[in-house]
Amino acid sequence: MDKHARLRQTSIDLLMGAGASKVGIATAETLEGGPESTDLSYVLPGARTSLVFALPLDQRAIESFLKKEDMAAANKDNHRVNTVAGGVALELAEYLNMKGFKSVPIIPNAVYRKDVPGGIYTEIPPISHRYLAARSGIGHFGLSGNIITKEHGAAIILGSVVTTAIFNHTEPLLPEDNYCDHCKLCMSSCASGLMDDKNKTTVKIGGVEFSYAKRRTYSRCDYVCGGFTGLHSSGKWSTWSPARFPIPENDEEFIPALMNAVEPYRKRPHQEFGCNIYHPLAPGNRLDFTCGYCQFVCHPDKAVRVRRHKMLVESGVAIQGKDGKIKGVSPEEAKRHLAAMDNETRAMYEWQSQ
């Protein structure tokens, strides 16, 4: 084994030893022709390789979150795994730097390109972990556009390291091994309507094609997953957001809806789990993790997917008490809860004209 092969294996061992469930390697060559967010030189001129890895989320926290029994466990786990992934990426990058290869860690989330029209609000990542993960064999694209794995479904957090070191790449997984059967439970679990039911996005990366449901404006996910609102159009269930501002049909209406919901969002009490999630685009920089359902419902076992979707749609509607705590109740109880509020308090949760 030559020194490059030894360094490659040591890098993989470092990531796996830190808790990664899988490691993939993409190179400038295997990423050639891909979307702009597969250009490694954007973050590191002269970059030749990227190591991408997956860290699993705690499956035990998922179902209690879906059933609106426990909001804290999934929030704490999401914060922990994202933080660990960023730290592991930094650890490997500095290890490779010490070995004489310029390297840059790419943390999992909340980092966007500033030099594009719209700046960070366009939400284009410096490097797409998803594209690297698909091309290097971490997992497949599910219909949702999430990376799914046979071990943990979509319940993973991805991190990457970009380096000038030259490592042999890993191959993408075989399409026929993808467990996604287009059950569309991810779509029916998304109150925002982020995924297009009819159109797909197809990208070619290093000569290999990958497809998933076309995503509408990411403002949809900001508005709903960000906790500004969360009531599904059926009125029968919601995310963990206690607000019920309307979710628009058209993409163009989401920015105005977001702007109108900012002040109520600021005024509402925010949950304290001892691990606040900070995001540069969130009002006050605090983010409430209230959704992620497309990720949590998707499981390799279809029976589990069906069960989890049922948990969600039967979880009720989130309301917030005077003590700031959020719980799920029936749609009828939620309406009575809101009707009992004074107008000023009610305005934090729904428009007065409703």
Image (cartoon, grey):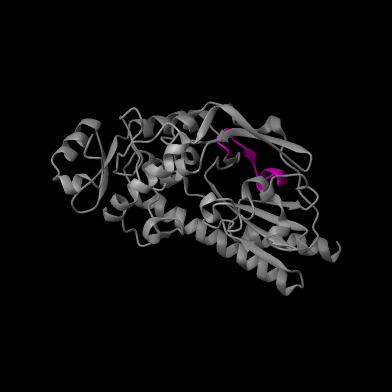
| Outermost residue, right side | 2
Image coords of residue 225 (percent x, y): 42, 45
Q: Residue at x 42, y 40 (%)?
A: 254
- Where's the C terminus, which quadrant? top left
Quarter of the image where one finds residue 93: bottom right
Magenta-drawn segment: 133-145
Height in image: 96 above or below 194?
below
Judged left or right of residue 25, residue 335 is: left
Residue nearer the viewer, 126 or 315? 126
Residue nearer the viewer, 46 or 96? 46
Judged left or right of residue 247, residue 6 is: right
Quarter of the image where one finds residue 86: bottom right
Height in image: 80 above or below 171?
below
Q: Is residue 29 visible?
A: yes
Height in image: 61 above or below 115?
above
Quarter of the image where one finds residue 269: bottom left
Image coords of residue 66 (percent x, y): 38, 39
Q: Residue at x 52, y 44 (%)?
A: 155
- Where's the N terminus, which quadrant? bottom right
- 250 falls in the magenta region: no
